Amino acid sequence: MNASRKFLTITGSLALAILAGIIIILVALHWLGLINAWLFPFKPVIAMLISVSLSCLILAQIRQEPKQQNQKSLKPQRRKKPKRRWPNRLLSLLITLLILFNIPTYFLAYHMTHVRIAGQPGIGIPKPRNSSIPSDRGLPYITHKIPVTQSEWLETWLIPSQTSSSKGTVFLFPGNRGTKGSQLLAPAQSFTSFGYDSLLVDFQGVGGSSGNKTTIGIKEAQDVVTALRYSQQLNLKPPFILYGVSMGSAAILRAISVNGIKPDAIILELPFARILDAVKSRLKYYRIPPFIRAELLIFWAGVQHGVNGFTHNPIDFAHDVNCPALVIHGEQDKWTTVAEIKALFQNLKSPKQLIISPDVGHQQLIGIHRSLWNSTLKKFLNSL
């Protein structure tokens, strides 16, 4: 058995052994009552270990040398030249590097797109909770749970207009790992003072909604659709205006382009243009070389969630927007450049406005310059 085939066989067998060991340990700990094994991410871990094992074992079989015939020849045998081993060693090295590079990237993708229930073992940050409620700001509200399936739901807060009659309804959606309590209360307070009812929505995986996953706006687009379609059951008054922060903006644009919703107006604060550029900018910020790793992160996250992340580009979705749009961005945003925002804005066909604040980063403008945010939004809403 040559070196590369031996290495592949050992690696494939080791992956299966690790899988078996994980299952045995989880069953034992669950039986002892120490953990809830059902919270462990079985599907992605099993898929990864089985794929590594099968890949290695198949490659080992391909590398198998043909058996030599034992027939003796009457003619004297020439002395065979010793085989060069460097190709096998090079192949083994490349396979080792490939495995070592992909395994941490796979788990990083899982960590970035999953949350865990606080106090429970698992991979990912604790599930974000609502740190404050509307009554903390003196705002009356009603909590509604919008059903998604029999076991899934979106938790929302409906805050009525502070005026005698409502001018319409604003649907508010938070950014990645943001909640209605952490990112949407301040904007909602302004919207209600302008005369609009506000429906604050927790995406699945955060706040009071079900789930433990985030897909950076891909599946969240369906949450936007679900909330908008539920407006009839809640007797919400049109026109319907959608407001999104960062990932919430991406979900709104995707829901318009892919799902075909038709809001009366949209407000996009801190959007990103392309998911690949957004991932690269974050890797660079944390001094992680983005070359190949960004593509692998998107690939493995797509495998885990059953989506194609490479097509998730709000700059392309913007072509399908046919309603008035307001885009708000900070010039100091370290994740998305002004050039990217201007390119996205250029693709919007409908009546549009762009506000770029020179001293704001990836932060909601209302938290830095509330008066500017209020005057900008009031002017936009009055133009509808």
Image (cartoon, helix red, strand yellow):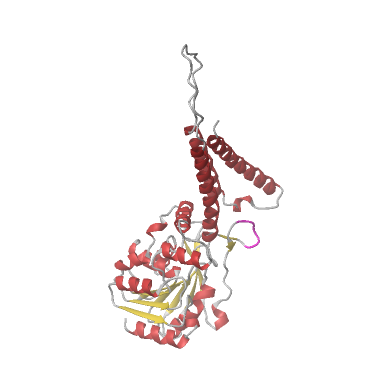
Residue drawn at x 51%, y 75% is 183
Can residue 236 be spotted in the picture?
no
Assign the magenta stretch its main secondary structure: loop
Q: Position of residue 28 (x, y in %)?
A: 69, 45
Q: Position of residue 140 (x, y in %)?
A: 52, 80
Report which quarter residue 218 is drawn in: bottom left
**Which part of the image, by quadrant, shows the N terminus?**
top right
- Residue 29 drawn at (x, y percent): 69, 48
Depth check: 380 or 158 in front? 380
- Count of marks, rendered view: 0
Q: Answer whether residue 172 is visible to the viewer in this image.
A: yes
Q: Looking at the image, which residue is at 58% across and 64% down?
A: 127
Judging depth in this view, the residue of 33 and 355 nearest the camera is: 355
Q: Is residue 111 magenta?
A: no
Instruction: State the residue lying farthest toward the right.
Output: 32
Left or right for 207, reference 322: right
Residue range (magenta) = 118-122
Residue 229's spot in the image, x, y percent? Answer: 39, 66
Q: Which residue shows up at 41% across the image and 81% down it?
A: 196
- Looking at the rendered image, the quarter that the C terminus falls into is bottom left
